[in-house]
Image: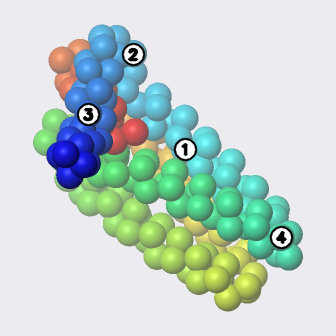
Amino acid sequence: MLAGGVAVGVIGSRLFPPLLAMGRGAATGSGGDPFEKLENDHRLILETLRKMEQTDESSTAKRTGLFLLAKRKLAKHALAEEDVVYPLLTDEAERREAAKHLYDEHADMKILLFEIETALMRGEPWATPVRSLREMVERHAREEEQEQFPRLRQVLGEKKFAQVHREEALIL
């Protein structure tokens, strides 16, 4: 009996969130710009990175908290872009090279996150890799917001906007 309850709980915990997200995505998919959430993410990520730059190196707990927050925000954001936006750039906007460039930048950001985590674990200064990451995210966000998102807004119709909302809801 207990095993059956556990199995139902596990299955429910794996299936319910995506179904809920799909419903929420479908509900929010009518109208609204699906790229606004990603642009807001850019602001939040950059704000967190600025706080990381300003945090005293002796404050291990604060540094750890900020690092985990930045890593989580970046991971969720990157997943949404890599699974939804960049394929649309490739297929719908015919910008394969731009999408590849953005994927490559995500890889570079992950390498910097590893460097930051290593510095944190060793109790070493992290100012240089954090600044590099912040500058990279600023350039990356500017390119997306000024070039790629406007292009996608041009080529995607309302039906595709609803699809983007649904897919983002599954991830974000």
- Relative to 56, does residue 125 appear above or below in the rendering? below
Q: Looking at the picture, which amino acid does disc 1 mark?
A: His
The CA distance from mark 4 to mark 1 is 25 Å
> Under tag 4, what secondary structure?
loop
Q: In which quadrant of the rendered view does residue 91 lie? A: top left
**Residue 132, position as x, y percentages in the image:** 62, 70
Residue 59: mark = 4
- Relative to 68, does residue 142 appear above or below in the rendering? above
Kindly indicate whether the residue at mark 3 contacts the one at mark 2 (C-beta within 8 angstroms): no
For marks 2 and 1 on the same chain, the one whose residue lies earlier in the sequence: 2
Would residue 41 be found to the left or right of residue 169 on screen?
Answer: right
- Give me the residue at 34% from left, 66% from top: 104
The local crowd at label 1, few if under 14, some if 14 to 19, many if 20 or more residues have their Cα within 10 Å, is many
The local crowd at label 4, few if under 14, some if 14 to 19, many if 20 or more residues have their Cα within 10 Å, is few
Q: Residue furthest front?
A: 1
Q: In which quadrant of the rendered view does residue 163 lie? A: top left
**Residue underneath mark 3:** 16
Residue 32: mark = 2
Residue 42: mark = 1
Q: How many marks can you see?
A: 4
**Residue 157, position as x, y percentages in the image:** 21, 18
